[in-house]
Image: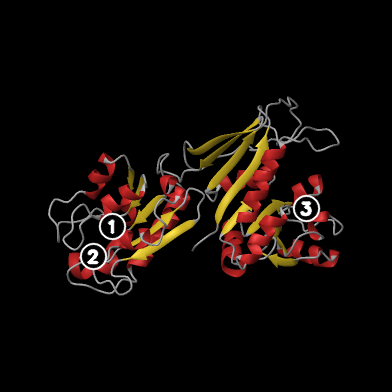
Amino acid sequence: MPLPHVLLSAAVSLDGYLDDTGPERLLLSSPADFDRVDEVRASVDAILVGAGTIRADNPRLLVNSPERRAARVAAGRPEFPLKVAVTASGDLDPAARFWHTGGAKLVCTTDEGAERARRAGLAADVVSLGPELRDWRPLLEHLYDERGVRRLMVEGGGTVHTQLLQQGLADELQLVLAPLLVGDPDAPRLFGPGAYQGGRLRLLETRRIEDVVLARYAPTAPGTGPAVSAADRRWLELACDLAAQCPPSETAFSVGAVVVASDGSELARGHSREGADPVVHAEEAALAKISPGDPRLATATVFSSLEPCARRASRPAPCARLILDAGVRRVVTAWREPDTFVAGADGNALLTSGGAVVVVLPEYEQRAKEPNRHLVGG
């Protein structure tokens, strides 16, 4: 079941606190970082917070820039992202600014919480997800299927961030480190105790923004090591699904490919024999849809159901070379190319020698083979 790209956003002190215990909200970000957050908000379909954040901070969660709001409207999107509140009890103040600013609002809660939220007259749609809120997957599935949310920004609080990471459902962590120390053991921390899925996070970017530092990480999926995220698996599944759309052939494999930017947005997709070209390969078809020199390619990933080819008769350049020439330096694939049509070809070796990181997830091999059973059997 597809899920949104889940981006966790937080700012913390050097000793890991979200706030102090004073009556006023502790400002951890700089003005330039607040503008960066505004830019991220403008890029997403929904912004999610827990009930505790609404009670403690009374946030508006708006896109403040008129230019960014206008760009959303020009692209056919709502002026503001959907605002999502998650609460088990449904006990939320109907006078909070959350409900009276911005665009559409949604409350995700329990059966009991839904009754309380509706009685309170909250200015929002109310959705019950069952008798309790422990598993975040049904909530994310609802956002994807029923609300059209493809990119979800999660702005707090610490319990929400902790649970999404522990359940392996976060795709990206944007963490701002502020140059101050709180030192109060009663103050709220970003992450709580418990078992976290995956291992060492993969660093995507570091950036100095005035006196704070932004670090972007990709959490890793359990058992895959630090190079593979939960999002990697979902994109590779999509590539395998695209392979099933290929016109059948007795002389070529059916392959699907997706090119994904480092922020989790899809740049292009393609599949073998797409359109009117009977010999186009999946990676070739996807890359052709992206402007050459697009700066996002340098940090993008190509997901392909089959190892990109190292030799081919139908084109001067094989797909592994096309990937390298496009500037992409990370490839995730499901299935090593057999010798059915080209003996001894090693696209992964060509990619590696060109400086690309290649990740093979063999647990998806059978899924990649499915539209090719008439060629390879099994």
Above or below: residue 309 compared with residue 376: above
Residue type, mark 1 in image: Leu
Vertical side of 288 occupied by 173: above or below:
above
Which residue in the structure is indicated by mark 2?
Answer: 253
Quadrant showing the C terminus = bottom left
SS type, badge 3: loop
- Dot 1: what SS? loop
Front residue of 183 and 328 = 328
The amino acid on which the numbered mark 3 sits, given as a three-letter code, is Arg
Question: What element does badge 2 sit on?
Answer: loop
Could you give the CA–CA distance between mark 3 and mark 1, rounded to whole angstroms? 46 Å
Residue 60 marker? 3
Give coordinates of residue 304: x percent, y percent. Answer: 33, 56
Residue beneath label 1, please? Answer: 306
Q: Quadrant of residue 314?
A: bottom left
Are the two marked residues, 1 and 2, in contact with CB atoms closer than 8 angstroms? yes
Quarter of the image for residue 353 reads: top left
